[in-house]
Amino acid sequence: MFLFLFDSLWAAHLFQDINKACDAMIDDYEEEELPLDVLGAGLRVIAKHRSSTQSPNVSDFLLHLEGLFRKAIKLGFPVYFVL
């Protein structure tokens, strides 16, 4: 299930779009920290992808990811990606 979801997210260019918006390098080889000051840009990318996805699994993941970003902003923490 995880690999299918990851492949779906990668094929939808979610991580690539977050990378562009946040000047990051999220991929399956690197760990990446998104600092607090770029999380708003990441939220906009997630919202764009949520509005265009047709997959219930991807939509559910994006909803949880959006919640994680919002909580990090509220608490003043970065978001870490370890894929």
Image (cartoon, rainbow, N blue to C red):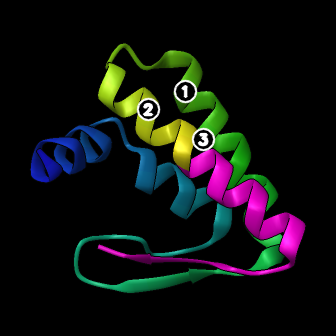
Q: Secondary structure at mark 3?
A: helix
Residue 31 point in image, percent of width and height: 39, 86
User: In this picture, is 61 found above or below 76?
Assistant: above
Q: Which residues are magenta?
A: 65-83
Q: Percent from the top left, x then y, of residue 82?
A: 36, 79
Name the image quarter holding residue 23: bottom right
Q: Earlier in the sequence, mark 2 or mark 1?
A: 1
Residue behind mark 2: 60
| Residue 49 sits above or below residue 37 on the image | above
Task: Identify which amino acid the numbered label 2 is placed on.
Answer: Asp
- Residue designated by label 1: 50
Residue 37 rendering spot, x and y as whole percentages: 84, 74
18 or 54, which lies in front? Answer: 54
The residue closer to the viewer here, 57 or 81, is: 57
Answer whether labels 3 and 1 touch (C-beta < 8 Å): yes
Q: Counting other residues with Cα less than 10 Å from the Cα at mark 2, is it few (<14), some (14-19), or many (20 or more)?
A: few
Q: x, y (%) of residue 30?
A: 32, 85
Q: Which mark is residue 46?
A: 3
Left or right for 34, reference 60 = right
Does dot 2 land on a helix, a strand or a loop? helix
Which quadrant holds the N terminus? top left
